Image: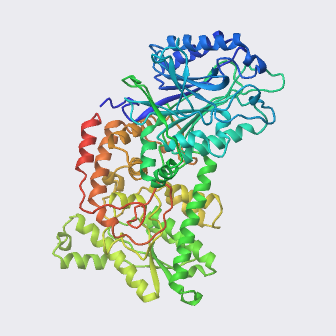
Amino acid sequence: MDFRNVYAQGFARVAACTVPVTLADPVANAARILDEVRRCHDMGVAVALFPELSLSGYAIDDLLLQDVLLDAVDTAVVTLAEATTKLLPLVVVGAPLRHGNRLYNCAVVIHRGEVLGVAPKSYLPNYREFYEKRHFAAGAGHQGEFIVRPGWPGADVDGEIPFGPDLLFAADDVAGLTVHAEVCEDMWVPVPPSHEAALAGASILLNLSASPITVGRAEDRHLLARSASARCNAAYAYAAASAGESTTDLSWDGMTMVYEMGALLGQSERFPDGPRATVVDVDLDALRQERLRQGSFDDNAEAYSADDAGFRVVPFRLRPPSGDLGLQRGVDRFPFVPDDEERLALDCYEAYNIQVSGLEQRMRAIGGGDPERIPTIVIGVSGGLDSTHALIVAAKACDRLGLPRTHVLGFTMPGFATSAGTKSNAIHLMESLGITWEELDIRPAATQMLTDLGHPFGRGEEVYDVTFENVQAGLRTDYLFRAANQRGGIVLGTGDLSELALGWCTYGVGDQMSHYGVNTGVPKTLMQHLIRWVVSSGQFEGEVNQTLLEILDQEISPELVPTKEGERIQSTEDSVGPYNLQDFTLFHVLRRGYRPSKIAFLAEHAWADASRGAWPAGFPEGSRPEYDLATVKRWMTVFHRRFFQNQFKRSAIPNGPKVVAGGSLSPRGDWRMPSDAAATAWLKELEETVPGS
């Protein structure tokens, strides 16, 4: 496998281009377009899109019906086709073309010296500033036709080239690269041709546009392109006319953009001086996976096909370049955490309130509608991130239910390795929140159990194995359940989504079990941002916020194994890997279904250089790590082993709300797998395809 090649990793490079136009001069326009195509070739672009009527100019009015112009357009098409014989991109340009007794506003599709097909504009605007029906015929209804151009390269023996809105252009050597072109107004109608094409298999949807600019129209274009890409599980590329068009009554902004499944991959500056291009790598694997998972997409295609004449597929061979071409798209280091500050705040608001409202409903349901029977909330508070967040969710749920916070019963349960700092933080947090709390030292009971088991620690030996750890974890949970029995309460679980993925929890009578798992839908990398948001949004007052900020600065540790003075405390991430990387892998396994090699490829681009790319707002600058490919591979191996080995823990998790769109691991929701499945195939693919040891 060509590991660092984007095409080998399931991407296709797409460029939405705009160039200055010379009105009614196809020769000059073809030369400018060709210059841009050559630049795209040098960048390894597979598909290069240009604006509507880019060979002639859009705003030329009745010159569109002049034979001199139309002859020159035909000649320019041939010139452009012949000049691209040795160039990589599938080139899509706009041109006015005669067909039968009418003129059509067309997208001309060219590749390696041949005209592959011509897609006419299906729907013509004839309102406000548009008067296209004065010149053009509508392309809707012209499925299955051919345009006759005997002199054009690519024409068959009868001089025919496929013509109609029903054309799909499919690369036979790049899996999933299937292109459809529509023209400007086609995306503004209720049922755009591109949507039909997506149902027929198109993954890259192109819009050649002129679209003069008025105040607010750019936002409308974004809305339509984003919506089209999201609803069609596709990429949607848009290119608008630029400088050189007539400004007698209108103006032009040269807008280009590409969306993928609702996400903006890139856009160019508007009102440019000279040519501009949005060049991005579209993730064909992601499009395929989303359609695979979203069964309603194919159901819609089947229902629609009853009245659909079908699409014609025009094959072409791209012959993509090999080697490292870089990656022309951003890769989120934290796919569960937005980089944009406003979006992050919104996500945290929603996540926190999902958890709080979920817990409220569970408490009301247990109480049977009687406020007097609403159970107390029993929770173990360690002073770590997860229990801290579960506690502030519980406190807020009580506030909303009109219950005193004393309805929450917190236990701090020091064990053999509990540090003074975490215990102090736990106590300060419980006191400042005003909950009921107690300290319950588990060390005597743990020592007795280890002694009864004949464990070496019971004889005074420093043996800190899994039994030593799990005796502590199990006793804590056992005490919480018995306290809940005694006090008429429910045990609130604190374990998070990342711990469930890695099996970093003690099964059964341990932190894997509770009456309600409020954190099971929250990944570890989001947890710190949720707590920061709780502070910044003023959910609590007084000393609560200061304690929350102190907790954020602590090492993530189970605090089960004692350390000697001067030694580093037990670190969770030393055992299961950095949560930064493991959450990255989890997202792409759970949400995308990617191969390990592709996840490693993306992880290298996301994490190899801390100075490159965006970081979420509030992420400490002094704590921004880098991971090379060998490190990525090492921890991905750990992830896949642990993920498969610990499914039995996830198969028995308690109820808890799904929180992030990236998915959950509930066997009643997003993730179902047998507990006896093996990671063999995944580990083999990782070992054989990813360089490094």
**Res 12 quadrant in image:** top left
Q: Position of residue 73 (x, y in %)?
A: 64, 14
Badge count: 0
Rendered position, 440 above or below 551: below
Q: Visible in this render: residue 693?
A: no
Give 213 or 200, whichever is nearer the viewer. Answer: 200
Rendered position, 520 above or below 207: below
Give 677 or 175, whichever is nearer the viewer. Answer: 175
Q: Visible in this render: residue 555?
A: yes
> Which residue is at 48% across, 48% downward?
335
- The C terminus: image quadrant: top left
> Which residue is at 65% across, 63% downward?
538
> Which residue is at 25% across, 52% downward?
679
- The N terminus: image quadrant: top left
Q: Position of residue 158 (x, y in %)?
A: 48, 17
Give 121 or 280, whichever is nearer the viewer. Answer: 121
Horizontal relation, residue 6 to residue 69: left or right: left
> Which residue is at 31% across, 41% downward?
633
Q: Position of residue 179 (x, y in %)?
A: 50, 33
Q: Position of residue 412 (x, y in %)?
A: 43, 74
Horizontal relation, residue 19 to residue 2: left or right: right
Q: Residue furthest right?
A: 249
Rendered position, 26 above or below 559: above
Horizontal relation, residue 258 to residue 332: left or right: right
Horizontal relation, residue 184 to residue 686: left or right: right
